[in-house]
Amino acid sequence: MSIISKIESILFVASKPLSIKQIVKTISVKEIDVREALETLKMKYNQDNSGIRILFSEELIQMSTAPENVEYVDLFIKDEVSGELTKAQLETLTVIAYRGPITRPELEQIRGVNCSLIIRNLLVRGLIEEKEEENKILPLYFVSLEALRHLGIDSVENLPDYEIIHKHEYIENILNNKENDQ
């Protein structure tokens, strides 16, 4: 797999700007190689016909939507966050509640699908929160106090069968198999 492909994937899953040093550390390559790959990605995406942009601010890099598409992105997000939760949103919220704190890739490994828009929706609704840990690229997601209030409980440990589901053998196997594949 090429350096460009690795960096592109990391930028896609990162929910925050990343430093060049974080990328270098994550993929274990020279800084000059990361900078060259970022320039290639910039040429690939930062064009009029692309809906994606690679943003640079000092030593920080982030993948973002094209600013000229903000109207459509806002409409999409507005539609996504109004009304009742979908089955996929409820499932994601349940996994976060029972398994959290959890990273997006872990959540996607358990659910088997991309969860980025669902996570964004749950964040906007205030049902989950994001916590960034020092020296980690990916944030952790956990159920918010607002969600607990709606559920009428004071802690996720008070969810039905929490202890059984939180460390369920099936989920442990899914996550351990992913770690072993890497």
Image: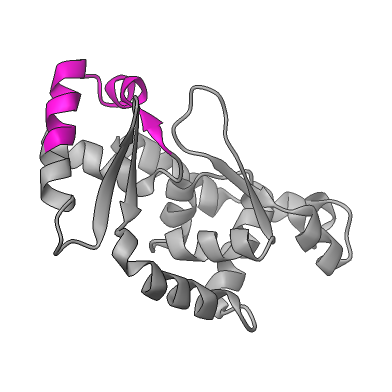
> Is residue 136 at least partly visible in the picture?
yes
Examine the residues drawn in magenta and state their main secondary structure.
Answer: helix
- Say which residue appears at 84% left-offset and 51% top-offset: 155
Q: Position of residue 99 (x, y in %)?
A: 63, 50
Res 174 visible: no
Q: Is residue 169 left or right of residue 129?
A: left
- Above-or-below relation of 28 to 47: above
With 90 as the anchor, is 54 left or right in this view? left
Residue 56 place in picture, x, y as percent? 30, 36
| Residue extending farthest front | 68
The residue positioned farthest toward the bottom in the image shown: 83
- Residue at the image position 42 percent from the left and 53 percent from the top: 109
Q: How far across and down, in percent of the image, does residue 134 sit?
A: 55, 23
Q: Nearer the viewer, residue 85 or 82?
A: 82
Q: Is residue 100 magenta?
A: no
Residue at 48%, 28% in the rendered image? 136
Residue 30 figure quarter = top left
Which is more toward the observer, 135 or 159? 135
Visual colour scheme: one colour
Magenta range: 17-39
The correct choice, above or below, for 74 with respect to 23 in the image is: below
Q: Is residue 23 magenta?
A: yes
- Image quarter (top left, top right, bottom left or bottom right) of the N terminus: top left
Of the pair 100 and 81, the residue shown nearer to us:
81
All told, the count of numbered labels is: 0
Q: Quarter holding the C terminus?
A: top left
Question: What residue is at 32 percent from the left and 68 percent from the top?
Answer: 69
Image: 50 above or below 2: below
Horizontal and vertical percent position of residue 169: 56, 49
